[in-house]
Amino acid sequence: MTKIIDLRSDTVSKPGEEMRRVMAEAEVGDDVFSDDPTVNRLEALAAERLGKEAAMFVPSGTMANLAAVLSHTRPGEEVVLGDRAHIFNMEAGGAARLGGLQMRVVRNLADGGLDPGEVAEVLRKETMHSPGTGLIALENTHNFKGGTAVPVASVDALGELARAHDVPLHMDGARIFNAQAALGVEAKRIAHACDSVSFCLSKGLGCPVGSLLCGSEEFIERARRYRKMLGGGMRQAGIIAAAGVYALENNVDRLAEDHANAALLAEGLGKHEAFRTNQPQTNIVMAEIVRGDAGDWMRKLKDAGVLAVMSGPQRMRLVTHINITRTDVELAVSRIDTILEGVAV
Ligand SMILES: *Cc1c(COP(=O)(O)O)cnc(C)c1O
């Protein structure tokens, strides 16, 4: 039977034996009463790793971002963010629907960051006529831009601008530990200029579920009420939080392996004229299909046991993760080579 190599996303990663063991043995309580010792431990650990006063455990990255956006703003305000931001494109318009917020997009730069000059141009105060800016949001690493790690100096520059205008800055750090590995800079330093930062446990860190939102004590206190409102107040959540504690202690340093595997995969794809790939800084490979039909390519890959997703009309996304070994990547590349041998190009 053909071994399936699932590169659709790092969210497809499954918990290993050791992680499942700590989950089964987790001490639990009712987290809505703040009684779950394992959730409390995870929140303390996350706050420490991100260099913030407090943290809140939530079921998903989408909820972490939405709780952040709601906590920072008032309805009718404007959120300034990148045109390729996950919050703008992939979170079902929750900020608009549930927060009554207007999204104001500026161009995402090639590295996933935002140009401070362009952001400065759109910041505005509330007047009789115009909405005021309630929040600026960044993303690091940047998913759509190909897992790019936004440089610290660029985050700092936006932080300075945000402070000067008295506007809070949020970082969607779903994959911030990938940025840490790529930049060789601690996550807490990357997020230093941000008032809040979210990150996912369920992606490269290999947990079955969960995200965290980090910020000041006062901010997290407000966010807890929104979490409750959104239906994210969980009870014996220590069972899933235990996976998060395990992952923060064991699965962070190994992210560099995923990055090396992504580089190998991009190299393997890029040697064919059919594809133009990014040079992945982290675990996301974007392959522009320059020869042939994208749907056709996806089918051929699937038939060969290599799973990817579309990320644009002629663009495939392939993501490495904890369940993908170097051998798997070599196998995927050799299967792609075989497909191309049979195709007239
Ligand atoms: C995955 C992701 C999210 C949302 O996470 P979910 O847990 O899937 O809701 C947010 N931002 C970015 C950049 C992501 O890649």
Image (cartoon, rainbow, N blue to C red):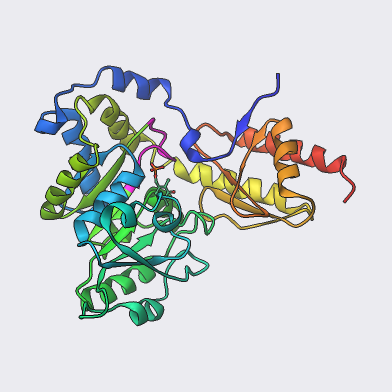
Residue at 36% from the left image edge and 53% from the top image edge: 173
Residue at 24% from the left image edge and 37% from the top image edge: 232
Q: In the image, 253: left or right of 310?
A: left
Is residue 279 shown to the viewer in this render?
yes
Q: Quadrant of residue 73?
A: bottom left
Residue at 47% from the left image edge and 71% from the top image edge: 107
Q: Is residue 202 magenta?
A: yes
User: Where residue 146 sits: x, y (%)?
Assistant: 54, 56
Q: Is residue 127 magenta?
A: no
For the magenta stretch, what is the residue range?
A: 199-208
Query: Looking at the image, is 230 positioned above or below residue 88?
Result: above
Query: Looking at the image, is 180 positioned above or below residue 337?
Result: below
Magenta region, mostly helix, strand or loop?
loop
Q: Residue furthest front?
A: 129
User: Where residue 118 sits: x, y (%)?
Assistant: 40, 79
Q: Quadrant of residue 224?
A: top left
User: Where residue 313 sits: x, y (%)?
Assistant: 65, 54
Residue at 38% from the left image edge and 32% from the top image edge: 207
**Pick the front one: 8 or 3:** 8
**Pick the front one: 231 or 36:** 231
Count of numbered circles on the image: 0
Is residue 186 shown to the viewer in this render?
no
Query: Looking at the image, is 215 positioned above or below residue 77?
Result: above
Q: Quadrant of the N terminus?
A: top right
